Image (cartoon, grey):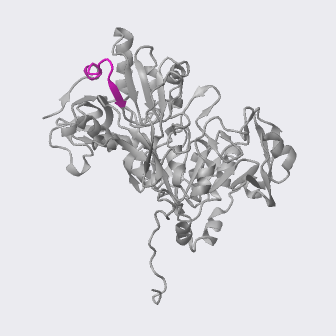
Amino acid sequence: MSARIVTVEQAVDLVRDGDALWIGGSGAGHGVPQAFIDGLADRFTRTASPRDLTTVRVVGIGDFAERGLSQLALPGLTRRTIGSNIGNEPRLGALAAGGEIESYSFPQGVLSALCRDIAAGRPGHLTHVGLGTYVDPRQTGGRQNARTAEELVQIVELSGREWLFYPALPVDVVVIRATTADEDGNLTFEREPILGDSLALAMAAHNSGGVVIVQAERLAARGSLRPNEVRIPGALVDYVYVDGTQRQTYETAHSPFYSGELRMPSTGGPPTPLDVRKVIARRALLEFRPGDICNLGFGISQQIGAVAAEEGVADRLTLTVEQGIFGGIPAHGPDGGAGANYQARLEQPSMFDFYDGGGLDITSLSFAQVDQDGNVNVHAFDDRLRGPGGFVNISALTGRLCFVGTFTAGGLQVRLTDGAPSIQREGARRKFVETVQEISFNGRMALEKGQEVRYITERAVFALTEDGLELIEIADGLDVRDDVLAHMEFKPKVSECLRLMDTRLFRTARMGIADDFERNRHGSTGQRDARRVRGDRAGQPAHERRLPRTDPESP
């Protein structure tokens, strides 16, 4: 049966009161069916219908202002919302913070995998991801306000250990985006920045008896698409509407580099301006080793890719983005989630399979709070609701972790002189606190798994040890007591071998990291295997790779 070609208004009219509506895409417009969101908001404003929806998206969808799911923050439209980061959608977050709607925040990779589990008819998603963090039902269970009463996450014991079980959710309507649809509904994604969860979502809706709606940039004749380029077959698609004005992201109309149509040339330009964020990104990069497979989180971590390119070592690392970009140079700023010059563009559930299984060697992620036990909070601070995105998945089994951020927040001013920082004004908010507000990353469990953890700021570097945080580096010219300990709510251990931070971090010239990589190029593969964390097999080594024998006489 051929898909029906409809208008966006007709597509929006397919949503009924009480439906579970899943919207594909990611972040700031990446693969987002924006015309549908516009149309749904307009329909409700005019007719007060549909009402009491459950809105679900794997990744927060919005520009941190008015666009995206903020547009659906209309009293009566949404009864319950589920996602990994409501921070992109401040108006919707305000409704949840005010107790006007139910709101759940689950890890991005859990929701991504759940799409595929629903498609397969499984009862839900069983995983180690989230144990010991806020989403553990012994903490909040992912519930973001008092109105949200139903407990959706369960603790299950299997094979002598604990797991978290996230039950399957209803799927009535799915709306996704593609580049080209033919008259039968076959879909290609040639101009899209990501593939995301589109295939899993389409299968989940189809197999649940739901409706699959597609926004496409253009319509092609039946039989004109190359079969090997079709990512979703028309048999899974019910309705298609065309939006010839769709953009790759809210920021970018179309970049051939994001879609992989062209490779971005090397600019060879001058270094980016030196500031505190670049200092932190540089210091994090010093933890990376040649051959590492890496993930770079949102915020400061996004700059690591640019610093690596500037230092001429980007091709010595495999940088990945959870939305599915494998290799190349991750985009930063509003376009974060896309990438250029990548090796492959994967579907998001497959990327999280790789992360959840411990495939990464190292990651750099932001922190908002760190406590004396090494716990990190990235998703719940101040008065505004947020969420962790892919943070919980990415940090769960990665062997080496860098948590990056400024030492304090709220008005911090730092002057960078030649080889050292000078604190001009301290931030009003302390980030190293006695107890984090909520746990995004569990320090005690990280030690049990054998993870190597660093907390990196512009003035100091800490390591996670059995005794909690240990100060291992301080910037030249700063005082341990006055510039570090005085601005923490707890007293960390100070290393007997306390070192100065590399003075190259604070200079405008390139650091020469390529030379460091050259010195470290031998043995990196063996080191990587030795760093595999224990994972989920009751203390047994996880994911050990077989290496070729170098000695022909060895057994």
Q: Residue at x 50, y 52 (%)?
A: 329
Highlighted range, magenta: 10-22
Q: Position of residue 502 (x, y in %)?
A: 75, 58
Relative horizontal placement of residue 379, taking residue 424 as reference (left or right): left
Residue 530, position in %: x, y? 55, 68
**Residue at the left extreme of this rendering:** 1
Looking at the image, residue 549 lies above or below residue 75: below
Examine the rendering and report whether any part of residue 342 can be seen.
yes
Observer-nearest of 226 and 530? 530
Q: What is the count of numbered marks?
A: 0
- Residue 15: give x, y in percent of width and height: 29, 21
- Image height of 408 relative to 5, above or below: below
Image position of 9 with respect to 370: above or below: above
Q: Is residue 192 visible?
A: no
Query: Given the current orientation, which residue lies at the most extreme bottom position?
Result: 553
Quadrant of the image containing the C terminus? bottom left
Asked whether residue 533 is drawn in magenta, I would say no
Left or right, residue 180 beside residue 318? left
Asked if residue 18 is positioned above or below residue 510 in the image, the reply reads above
Nearer to us in this view, 432 or 283: 432
- Residue at (50% x, 27% y) in the render: 89
- Residue 21 is inside the magenta segment: yes
- For residue 53, which quarter of the picture? top left
Rendered location of residue 261, percent (x, y): 37, 49
Image point (56%, 42%), residue name: 133
Taking the image as shown, residue 319 lies to the left or right of residue 172, namely right
Q: Which part of the image, by quadrant, shows the N terminus?
A: top left
Q: Residue at x 26, y 21 (%)?
A: 14
